[in-house]
Amino acid sequence: MREPRDFRKSLFLCMAIVIASYTSFSLVVYRYCGQWVAVPSLGSAGSTIKIVAYGVGFVGLLVSGCLYLHVGAKYVFVRILRNSEHLQSDTWVHWATWLGCTTGLGAIAFILAQAIPIFNYLLSLTGSLCFAPIALSLPGWLWCFDNMAWRRGSMRQRVVFWITAAMIPLGVFICVGGTYGVVVQIQEAYASGRIGELRLSFVLGGSLL
Protein backbone atom coordinates (compact mmCIF):
# COMPACT_ATOMS: atom_id res chain seq x y z
CA MET A 1 0.00 0.00 0.00
CA ARG A 2 2.89 2.41 -0.55
CA GLU A 3 0.99 3.38 -3.69
CA PRO A 4 -2.70 4.24 -3.06
CA ARG A 5 -3.42 3.15 -6.62
CA ASP A 6 -2.69 -0.44 -5.55
CA PHE A 7 -5.69 -0.47 -3.22
CA ARG A 8 -7.90 -2.47 -5.60
CA LYS A 9 -5.15 -5.03 -6.18
CA SER A 10 -4.60 -5.44 -2.44
CA LEU A 11 -8.34 -5.68 -1.81
CA PHE A 12 -8.91 -8.36 -4.45
CA LEU A 13 -5.88 -10.37 -3.32
CA CYS A 14 -6.90 -10.20 0.34
CA MET A 15 -10.51 -11.19 -0.34
CA ALA A 16 -9.42 -14.01 -2.67
CA ILE A 17 -7.22 -15.48 0.08
CA VAL A 18 -9.93 -15.08 2.72
CA ILE A 19 -12.68 -16.62 0.57
CA ALA A 20 -10.44 -19.51 -0.52
CA SER A 21 -9.40 -20.19 3.10
CA TYR A 22 -12.92 -20.11 4.53
CA THR A 23 -14.39 -22.16 1.67
CA SER A 24 -11.71 -24.86 1.66
CA PHE A 25 -11.73 -25.22 5.45
CA SER A 26 -15.53 -25.43 5.58
CA LEU A 27 -15.73 -27.98 2.77
CA VAL A 28 -13.04 -30.21 4.29
CA VAL A 29 -14.67 -30.13 7.75
CA TYR A 30 -18.14 -30.82 6.36
CA ARG A 31 -16.78 -33.61 4.14
CA TYR A 32 -15.47 -35.58 7.12
CA CYS A 33 -17.87 -34.47 9.88
CA GLY A 34 -21.12 -33.64 8.11
CA GLN A 35 -24.04 -32.73 10.33
CA TRP A 36 -22.19 -34.06 13.40
CA VAL A 37 -19.57 -31.29 13.31
CA ALA A 38 -18.76 -29.90 16.75
CA VAL A 39 -19.05 -26.25 17.80
CA PRO A 40 -16.44 -24.89 17.35
CA SER A 41 -15.45 -27.13 14.47
CA LEU A 42 -11.96 -27.76 15.86
CA GLY A 43 -13.65 -29.98 18.44
CA SER A 44 -14.19 -32.55 15.67
CA ALA A 45 -10.46 -32.97 15.05
CA GLY A 46 -8.20 -35.53 16.67
CA SER A 47 -6.60 -34.81 20.02
CA THR A 48 -3.17 -33.91 18.59
CA ILE A 49 -4.59 -31.65 15.89
CA LYS A 50 -6.87 -29.98 18.44
CA ILE A 51 -3.96 -29.22 20.77
CA VAL A 52 -1.86 -27.79 17.95
CA ALA A 53 -4.74 -25.81 16.41
CA TYR A 54 -5.90 -24.30 19.67
CA GLY A 55 -2.30 -23.54 20.62
CA VAL A 56 -1.82 -21.60 17.39
CA GLY A 57 -5.22 -19.93 17.53
CA PHE A 58 -5.22 -19.15 21.26
CA VAL A 59 -3.52 -15.79 20.82
CA GLY A 60 -6.01 -14.73 18.16
CA LEU A 61 -8.95 -15.93 20.25
CA LEU A 62 -7.62 -14.06 23.28
CA VAL A 63 -7.06 -10.84 21.33
CA SER A 64 -10.53 -11.05 19.71
CA GLY A 65 -12.20 -11.60 23.07
CA CYS A 66 -10.28 -8.70 24.62
CA LEU A 67 -11.28 -6.41 21.74
CA TYR A 68 -15.00 -7.11 22.17
CA LEU A 69 -14.70 -6.81 25.95
CA HIS A 70 -12.78 -3.55 25.61
CA VAL A 71 -15.43 -1.98 23.36
CA GLY A 72 -18.28 -2.87 25.73
CA ALA A 73 -16.34 -1.87 28.84
CA LYS A 74 -15.27 1.43 27.29
CA TYR A 75 -18.88 2.30 26.48
CA VAL A 76 -20.02 1.59 30.05
CA PHE A 77 -16.96 3.34 31.47
CA VAL A 78 -17.61 6.54 29.53
CA ARG A 79 -21.30 6.48 30.43
CA ILE A 80 -20.46 6.20 34.13
CA LEU A 81 -17.76 8.88 34.27
CA ARG A 82 -19.15 11.27 31.67
CA ASN A 83 -18.88 14.92 32.75
CA SER A 84 -16.55 13.83 35.53
CA GLU A 85 -12.96 14.87 36.16
CA HIS A 86 -12.08 11.20 36.65
CA LEU A 87 -12.82 10.28 33.01
CA GLN A 88 -9.32 11.19 31.80
CA SER A 89 -7.48 11.61 35.10
CA ASP A 90 -5.08 9.15 36.66
CA THR A 91 -7.09 8.69 39.85
CA TRP A 92 -8.16 5.66 41.86
CA VAL A 93 -11.78 6.30 40.85
CA HIS A 94 -10.77 6.17 37.20
CA TRP A 95 -8.91 2.86 37.54
CA ALA A 96 -11.41 1.28 39.92
CA THR A 97 -14.25 2.06 37.53
CA TRP A 98 -12.32 0.79 34.52
CA LEU A 99 -11.24 -2.46 36.18
CA GLY A 100 -14.77 -2.91 37.53
CA CYS A 101 -16.25 -2.52 34.03
CA THR A 102 -13.85 -4.98 32.39
CA THR A 103 -14.05 -7.55 35.20
CA GLY A 104 -17.81 -7.23 35.58
CA LEU A 105 -18.62 -7.52 31.88
CA GLY A 106 -16.21 -10.43 31.49
CA ALA A 107 -17.86 -12.26 34.39
CA ILE A 108 -21.35 -11.58 33.03
CA ALA A 109 -20.35 -12.84 29.58
CA PHE A 110 -18.89 -16.03 31.06
CA ILE A 111 -21.97 -16.68 33.22
CA LEU A 112 -24.37 -16.13 30.30
CA ALA A 113 -22.32 -18.38 28.00
CA GLN A 114 -22.34 -21.18 30.59
CA ALA A 115 -25.82 -20.69 32.04
CA ILE A 116 -27.88 -20.57 28.84
CA PRO A 117 -28.17 -24.11 27.45
CA ILE A 118 -29.13 -22.88 23.98
CA PHE A 119 -26.46 -20.18 23.77
CA ASN A 120 -24.94 -21.57 20.55
CA TYR A 121 -28.37 -21.75 18.98
CA LEU A 122 -29.06 -18.17 20.00
CA LEU A 123 -25.85 -17.07 18.30
CA SER A 124 -26.93 -18.85 15.12
CA LEU A 125 -30.38 -17.31 15.36
CA THR A 126 -28.90 -13.85 15.81
CA GLY A 127 -26.66 -14.37 12.80
CA SER A 128 -29.58 -15.43 10.61
CA LEU A 129 -31.85 -12.59 11.70
CA CYS A 130 -29.26 -9.81 11.74
CA PHE A 131 -26.25 -10.69 9.60
CA ALA A 132 -28.03 -11.56 6.36
CA PRO A 133 -30.25 -8.44 6.15
CA ILE A 134 -27.59 -6.01 7.40
CA ALA A 135 -24.53 -7.44 5.61
CA LEU A 136 -26.16 -8.60 2.35
CA SER A 137 -29.58 -7.16 1.58
CA LEU A 138 -29.11 -3.64 2.92
CA PRO A 139 -25.71 -2.94 1.28
CA GLY A 140 -26.99 -4.35 -2.01
CA TRP A 141 -30.10 -2.18 -1.90
CA LEU A 142 -28.13 0.95 -0.99
CA TRP A 143 -25.59 0.37 -3.77
CA CYS A 144 -28.31 -0.20 -6.35
CA PHE A 145 -30.14 2.92 -5.16
CA ASP A 146 -27.00 5.04 -5.63
CA ASN A 147 -26.14 3.47 -9.02
CA MET A 148 -29.59 3.09 -10.55
CA ALA A 149 -28.30 4.48 -13.87
CA TRP A 150 -26.09 1.39 -14.26
CA ARG A 151 -29.19 -0.60 -15.24
CA ARG A 152 -29.01 1.03 -18.69
CA GLY A 153 -25.25 1.54 -18.85
CA SER A 154 -22.60 -0.53 -20.56
CA MET A 155 -22.65 -4.32 -20.50
CA ARG A 156 -20.14 -4.38 -17.64
CA GLN A 157 -22.20 -1.91 -15.61
CA ARG A 158 -25.40 -3.88 -16.14
CA VAL A 159 -23.73 -7.14 -15.09
CA VAL A 160 -22.32 -5.53 -11.93
CA PHE A 161 -25.70 -3.94 -11.16
CA TRP A 162 -27.69 -7.18 -11.40
CA ILE A 163 -25.07 -9.19 -9.51
CA THR A 164 -25.29 -6.63 -6.72
CA ALA A 165 -29.09 -6.62 -6.92
CA ALA A 166 -29.05 -10.40 -6.45
CA MET A 167 -27.63 -9.82 -2.96
CA ILE A 168 -31.02 -8.48 -1.84
CA PRO A 169 -33.04 -11.70 -2.35
CA LEU A 170 -30.01 -13.75 -1.29
CA GLY A 171 -30.00 -11.99 2.08
CA VAL A 172 -33.74 -12.50 2.45
CA PHE A 173 -33.38 -16.20 1.62
CA ILE A 174 -30.57 -16.70 4.14
CA CYS A 175 -32.52 -14.80 6.77
CA VAL A 176 -35.69 -16.83 6.33
CA GLY A 177 -34.03 -20.19 5.63
CA GLY A 178 -31.38 -19.80 8.32
CA THR A 179 -33.93 -18.77 10.92
CA TYR A 180 -36.16 -21.72 10.05
CA GLY A 181 -33.22 -24.12 10.22
CA VAL A 182 -32.10 -22.88 13.62
CA VAL A 183 -35.63 -23.08 15.00
CA VAL A 184 -35.90 -26.67 13.78
CA GLN A 185 -32.54 -27.50 15.39
CA ILE A 186 -33.69 -26.05 18.72
CA GLN A 187 -36.89 -28.11 18.59
CA GLU A 188 -34.93 -31.28 17.79
CA ALA A 189 -32.44 -30.54 20.59
CA TYR A 190 -35.27 -30.23 23.12
CA ALA A 191 -37.00 -33.35 21.78
CA SER A 192 -33.81 -35.42 21.99
CA GLY A 193 -32.95 -34.22 25.49
CA ARG A 194 -29.73 -32.49 24.49
CA ILE A 195 -31.16 -29.33 26.02
CA GLY A 196 -32.75 -29.76 29.41
CA GLU A 197 -33.63 -27.35 32.14
CA LEU A 198 -31.77 -24.10 32.50
CA ARG A 199 -28.64 -24.75 34.53
CA LEU A 200 -25.63 -22.80 35.70
CA SER A 201 -22.30 -24.53 35.12
CA PHE A 202 -18.86 -23.39 36.13
CA VAL A 203 -15.66 -24.86 34.79
CA LEU A 204 -13.16 -25.05 37.64
CA GLY A 205 -9.84 -26.85 37.40
CA GLY A 206 -10.90 -28.58 34.18
CA SER A 207 -13.95 -30.16 35.86
CA LEU A 208 -17.57 -29.35 35.17
CA LEU A 209 -19.32 -28.79 38.51
Image (cartoon, helix red, strand yellow):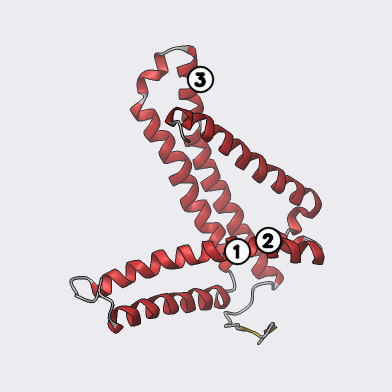
Residue 205 vertical placement versus 117 (above, below): below
Amino acid identity at mark 3 = Val
Look at the numbered discs 2 and 1 and tell me whether their residues touch, using CB distance below 8 Å: yes
**Residue at 73 percent of width and 64 percent of height:** 43
Assign a secondary structure to mark 2: helix
- Give the labeled residue for mark 3: 159
Residue at far bottom of view: 209
Query: What is the CA distance from the residue labelled 2 to the residue labelled 1?
Result: 7 Å
Query: What is the CA distance from the residue labelled 1 to the residue labelled 3?
Result: 42 Å
Assign a secondary structure to mark 1: helix
Q: Is residue 91 left or right of residue 121?
A: left
Assign a secondary structure to mark 3: helix
* Rendering coords of residue 4 (x, y %): 43, 31
- Give the labeled residue for mark 1: 59
* Rendering coords of residue 61 (x, y %): 58, 63
The mark total stands at 3
**Residue at 61 percent of width and 42 percent of height:** 18
* Rendering coords of residue 116 (x, y %): 55, 74
Q: Residues within 10 Å of mark 1 (few under 14, many from 20)?
A: few
